[in-house]
Structure formats: C-alpha cells, structure tokens
Amino acid sequence: MTIVLFLPPLILSFFNHPLINIINVAYQSFIVLTFIGLMPIGFMIPNGMTTTLFSFIGTILSVFSIWSIYKYRSTHA
C-alpha cells in the first residue's frame, strides 16, 4: 500500500515541467493531510504511539519533499 501511495510522486519527479510539478505538489499535499489526520487517531487507539510517531515522521518527510520541489523550481526558473 505504501509503495502504491508513493509511486506517483516518484514517477512525476522525473519530469521537469511546471504543470507536472504543481500536480506533484497537490498530490503530496493530500498525503500530508492524510498523515496529519492519522496523528489524533494514534492518540485515540490503545498503544497508538507507534502510529502517531510514524505519522509525524511521514508528515515531516512529505513537507520536506514539497519544500524541495518548490526550492528546485525557484532556483531553476
């Protein structure tokens, strides 16, 4: 499931077109919102600290990925 979720951004990252970068950022923003939604769920379930930890790490990595696309686009524009 994780591979299927992160495969489209990986494939889109090989193309250097502004519209594809925007689509990639929109898709990854959906992933960020999903990870943020998992954080409170991890607090509600018993022994859910692992879920909360992985959702926090996933949020940080996804935000860093979006930031790197923005930074790359701003330096190569």
Image (tube, rainbow, N blue to C red):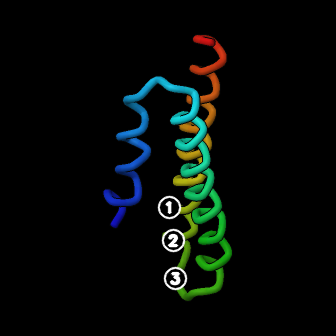
Q: Report, in whole angstroms, how far the alpha carbon at label 2 lies from the one at label 3.
A: 9 Å
Residue on which the image places disc 1: 54
Say what amino acid the circle numbered 1 marks: Phe
Q: Nearer the viewer, residue 3 or 47?
A: 3
Q: Nearer the viewer, residue 65 or 9?
A: 9
Say what amino acid the circle numbered 2 marks: Thr
**14, above or below 47, in the image:** above
Q: Report, in whole angstroms, how far the alpha carbon at label 1 lies from the one at label 2.
A: 5 Å
Q: Residue 38 appears in which quarter of the rendering?
A: bottom right
Q: Which mark is residue 51?
A: 2
Say what amino acid the circle numbered 3 marks: Asn
Contact, CB < 8 Å: mark 1 with mark 2?
yes
Residue on which the image places disc 3: 47
Q: Which mark is residue 68?
A: none
Where residue 54 appears, as percent x and y from the top left, is: 50, 61
Where residue 51 appears, as percent x and y from the top left, is: 51, 71
Quadrant housing the N terminus? bottom left
Q: Residue 42 appears in which quarter of the rendering?
A: bottom right
- Judged from the image, the secondary structure of the residue bearing numbered disc 2 is helix
- Judged from the image, the secondary structure of the residue bearing numbered disc 3 is loop
